[in-house]
Image (cartoon, grey):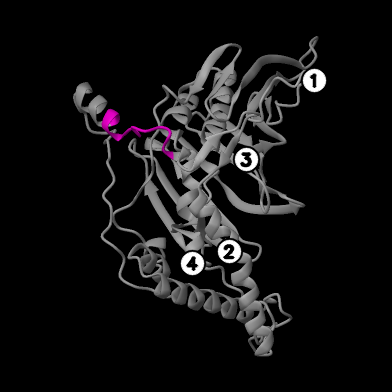
Amino acid sequence: MSTAPPPAPLTPLTVTTTTPQPSGTIKAAWTEAQVKDRMFWFKGFKDNKKGGVIFDDKDVLKKQQGVVKDIMLQLGAQLLSGKLAVRLSLPIRLFEPRSLLERIPDAWAYAPTLLAKAAHATEALDRLQHVMAFVVAGLHFCVGQSKPFNPILGETYQSTFPDGTSVYLEHVQHHPPVSAYYVEGPLKLFTLSGQCEFEAHLAANTLVNAQTGTVKVQFANGSEVQYAMPKFKMHGVVLGERMFEFTGECHFHDVSSDLRGTLDMDGNSSFLGRSHHDDITGTIVAPATKGAKPHVVAKLTGSWLNHLHANGVVLWDMATSPVYLHVPVATPLPSDVRFRADLISLKQGDMDEAQRQKIVMEEDQRRDHRLRGHDDGGGNKRHSTPKR
């Protein structure tokens, strides 16, 4: 990995949970740490009359539309030089100055509140409902249109939330790309762990992106909830307005009680056609017992844009529920994303140097991939020599 001195580290706001503090001090610190503008993520978007959101930032869209031309120029240059077209590099202007590892935790912004409530729940139903709300509440953070940098194998990221929740991520596989994560609440009140592997499918003018794998949430009382993420759908990839929605079903399982929850992200498919693309419906079903069949114990309704209710009770409301952002740790590992030379150059505004560093790092990773005995996609394969 190409390196350069990192920028000055950010010092996270911490509220020490083990040291007694006046209640007013804690309350003031938490209030100060809350995101003031809860609609900051909506910049560049507009509401869609049929639900969901439409990306309408003309400058960003213009940059993205020029990518095809850039790729064709790279392809032509490589063919003329006799090289196989497996070393294409996206132009730096498409990227935000963050790695994917920094962006993934954005969806966990409600962990300090909703996962904490789930951890303190005395009933399995209450626990499962708050985990489901935690997932829905984080979805709107996943629609940003500036592309993050792809992580380099072995790259890491560490951050904290104001309550002391710690976040750890590492990119553990190059192809297909897989990133592992582990989140630990204060005093191990809860942990969240899993792996991120994204599968994208392009059909005509629509892109469907799926995050595969099971997410596991474990609590201090020994209970555990597992779930899978819904699919993300983007219309207007090439032509027309770029509209976003989530699709498919999202399944949850409280292991100890065997309660099972389902969220239908296609709640817009009503016969009368009056619902919206962002509507969500769902149920929680209790298992069969002696003398009783499986039965629904909760019905959920809402929208990934603003709220989720269970049996009419508010679980999450964007307008009133506190939300917090993760802050990079002050003393990162040498493998941290903040040591990436291309990211540092981009943050400093040096686009040419950022592009050069990005290409160098990509070539280094391809070479390392081949040395490990993998095909780089162009038929070039090299196996390590066996030890004798």
- Kind of residue indicated by mark 4: Ile
Where in the figure is residue 292, as x and y percent of width and height?
A: 79, 11
Q: How crowded is mark 1: few (under 14 residues within 10 Å), some or many (20 or more)?
A: few
Q: Which mark is residue 66?
A: 2
The amino acid pointed to by label 3 is: Phe
Report if the CB atoms under discs 3 and 2 are less than 8 Å apart.
Answer: no
How many numbered markers are drawn? 4
Left or right: 12 in relation to 78: left
Residue 288 on image: x %, y %: 77, 18
Residues at marks 3 and 1, CA–CA distance in whole angstroms = 22 Å
Foreground of the two, 347 or 189: 347
Q: Are marks 4 and 1 in contact (CB under 8 Å)?
A: no
Q: Nearer the viewer, mark 2 or mark 1?
A: 2
Residue 230: x and y in percent read: 66, 38
Q: Mark 1 points at which residue?
A: 271
The Cα atoms of the two marked residues, 2 and 1, are separated by 40 Å
* Residue 244: mark in rendering: 3
